[in-house]
């Protein structure tokens, strides 16, 4: 008899590389990027294509507290994410999804999705049937590593604007 446990064991879980946005996929400006005109995509095309070709889903997980502060709109954020999609797609890279936290503790109080809490990663893990033990989170802040660890994902800390290619050897 096929039990739920046996069925779950038969379904292979996905592996993913979660990616912070600012300082990892686009140039870090030190504060919030408020306009599409200031949004500069970093050249991590070959590195992300290599990860994708190795079977990793590519998922963005980013704090966007500037929304709560009223510094930019959901529409402006959508334009930035579309630019990322378009620029990377030109190199054969497809992002599986974008998860973002629109909250800021000074404006909206506490939430479960703002890194260093793992909520954004947990959403991705659940939505895409991801095995956290086979997945990674690349970020340029300690809070990214903390969020990854809390979600059961291995965190990789890089410097802001550091090429992802320099850490590919840390990913199985």
Image: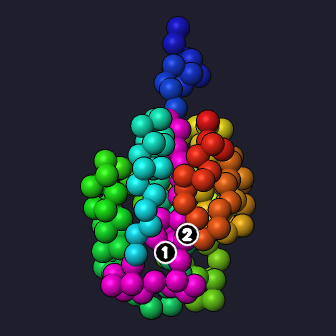
Percent of width and height locating residue 32: 51, 85
Seen as rendered, the residue at the extreme top is: 1
Report which residue position mark 2 lands on: 161
Please report the bounds of the magenta region as a residue range: 14-39
* Quarter of the view holding residue 63: bottom right
Q: Is residue 22 above or below residue 69?
A: above
| Residue at x-position 65% and y-position 67% | 159
Question: Is residue 111 shown in magenta?
Answer: no
Q: Residues within 10 Å of mark 1 (few under 14, many from 20)?
A: some
Q: Is residue 166 visible?
A: yes
Quick check: 112 left or right of 42? right
Q: Which numbered disc, 1 or 2, marks the residue that appears first in the sequence? A: 1
Question: Is residue 19 shown in magenta?
Answer: yes
Percent of width and height locating residue 16: 52, 44
Q: Is residue 91 above or below residue 21?
A: above
Nearer to the camera, 78 or 141? 141
- At numbered mark 1, what does the secondary structure look like: helix, strand or loop? loop
Report which residue position mark 1 lands on: 27
């Amino acid at each position: 008899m096929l039990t739920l446990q046996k069925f779950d064991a038969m379904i292979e879980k996905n592996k993913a590389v979660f990616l912070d946005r600012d300082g990892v996929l686009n140039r870090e400006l030190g504060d919030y990027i408020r306009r599409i005109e200031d949004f500069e995509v970093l050249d991590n095309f070959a590195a992300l294509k290599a990860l994708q070709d190795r079977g990793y889903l590519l998922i963005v997980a980013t704090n966007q507290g500037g929304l709560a502060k009223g510094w930019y709109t959901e529409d402006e954020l959508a334009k930035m994410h579309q630019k990322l999609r378009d620029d990377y797609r030109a190199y054969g890279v497809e992002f599986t999804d974008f998860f973002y936290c629109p909250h800021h503790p000074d404006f909206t109080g506490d939430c479960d999705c703002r890194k260093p809490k793992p909520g954004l990663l947990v959403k991705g893990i659940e939505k895409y049937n991801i095995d956290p033990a086979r997945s990674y989170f690349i970020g340029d802040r300690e809070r990214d590593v903390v969020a990854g660890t809390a979600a059961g994902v291995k965190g990789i800390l890089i410097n802001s604007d550091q090429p992802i290619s320099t850490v590919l050897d840390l990913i199985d």
